[in-house]
Image (spheres, helix red, strand yellow):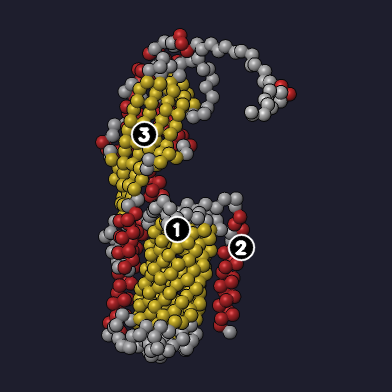
Amino acid sequence: MCMPFLARIFTTLALGSLMTTTALHAAEVSPKITVGTQEVGLNAGYLLPHRLTTDHTTKQEGPAFMPYWMMTLTDPIGGSWYRGQISLGAEMVYIQFQEPILTHGIGFAPKIKYTFVALDRIRPYAEFSGGPFWTDLAGKIPEESSQFNFVLMAGFGVSYFLTDQVALNAGYRFQHISNAGTQYPNLGLNASLPYGGFSFFF
Amino acid sequence: MIRHLIHRTILGLVVLTATTTVGCATRWIDVSPSPASRDNPVAQSILNDERVPFVMDGFRMTQNGAPQNPSSEVERRILNTVQETRLFSTLIPFGGNVASPGDKVVTARIAFDETIDSHSGDTAWKGFLIGASMFLLSPVIDLDYDYAAEASLELGRWDGQVKRYTARSSGTVHYTVFAATPTMIGELKGQVTEACLTDLMSQLIQDTNFYVANSAPLPDSSIVSVTVKARKPLPSPASLSVVPVSTTPAP
């Protein structure tokens, strides 16, 4: 019930971004991201569990929403395929755990991203983020005991610029949630998070 | 324990919000030479009929040593600055038509070299630190962006005499993460370019008398004669096909 509803929301958002950029096929799209360029966007995906040890039993899964803001800090670095820019920002992470119990999690994570610019409008990137995360799933599963946790995410993706200012994103993240040993048990929850979304640059 | 952590988190977020909204959004630009130390060029009054046209004959740009396509924006700015000196009657941009080739004109070759250093390595590390501190360090960690411009102006008088002028200016914008905008780089470049061109025009104005029309007569050699000869017709394809070829077999 919930998943089709969320899927519809996400599809609507994606189509909305496409419709707002009807001039998508301008002859040449060559985004000029300079120092100080800001990026806001929304990524959404679905959490898929990884039980890395035999002690991990929980199959947590559910949709995740990640609105974010980034600031470009450097001009392109390097002169080869790895030529890219560094940006710094932060994102909110909301996860609705639908399994094993319907619960929620929300966090705030500073984020650093390296975007490869050699391919012009197709821009792959690598990103890392981490920060505090609260969830009421903890305490109801054997892996986590405290509601206050930290979330660490690392992954890669690609932005496809529809215009100089609008891009669609698709990527993958590995996500780890644990409480940094502030309370035991603290096995941690690990998951894959494939996602899609859009960005607006200004 | 958990309450303690939650309280700390809330306190951190409050401090984060306060610092980011109050103290973080700062930036300033240092330009060398500073505007206060520069003498504004003061144009000498020249009679209108003593002014000669200024013809842009060459324009070259480099960025960090690499040749660039000449920017019409920079060219326009240079011409505007030259115009403000009121030394010349008209300004003809690069590629423009010179009305009377035999008249007295001053030809100009301009080189504009930009040097940009965004301190990418430092910025990356500082960005990592700022992120790791949940942006709490953002008010105290400054990021820098350097820009330097060097303008060289080579002016050739109608009698063949040449004078060269060079001016250099540099600047740095210091900013915190939340104060960064794309316009700040434009502001930095604008101020540095202005300082550079002001210095260049100051040097140019000191030679005002060199560029007035009565400072030198037109040389005789400026009258160029061109001899036109009828072109020798090309051989017809038929004549090309009758090139003798030896078919005698080798012994």
The answer to whether marks 2 and 1 sit on the same chain is yes
Q: Is residue B91 visible?
A: no
Of all residues shown, which one is farthest toward the right?
A: B238
Q: Which chain carries label 3?
A: B
Asked whether residue B62 appears in the rendered view, the answer is: yes
The residue identified by callout 1 is A116
Does residue B39 appear left or right of residue B72 in this picture? left
Is the residue at mark 3 from the same chain as the one at mark 2? no
Q: Can you give x and y, in whole percent of width and height, for residue A186 in the image?
A: 33, 85
Camera-side residue: A85 or A197? A85
- Chain letter, disc 1 residue: A
Instruction: Check disc 2 and give the amino acid type.
Output: Met
Give the mark nearer the N terminus: 2 vs 1. Answer: 2
Q: Do labels 1 and 3 share a chain?
A: no
Of badges 1 and 3, nearer the viewer stands 1
Give the amino acid at mark 3: Ala
The residue nearer to you, when weighing A120 against A17, is A120
- Asked if labels 3 and 1 touch by Cβ distance under 8 angstroms, the answer is no
Picture quadrant of residue B39: top left
Disc number at residue A19?
2
Residue tagged 3: B151
Examine the image and state in which quarter residue B139 appears: bottom left
What is the secondary structure assignment of the residue under circle 3?
Answer: strand
Q: In this view, does A13 lie above or below B199?
A: below
Residue type at numbered disc 1: Phe
Most foreground residue, B87 or A112: A112
Mark 1 and mark 3: span between their CA atoms? Answer: 33 Å
| Residue at x 38% of width, y 13% of height | B215
Nearer to me, B196 or A118: A118
Count the marks: how many?
A: 3
Q: Give left or right: position of B137 versus A202.
A: left
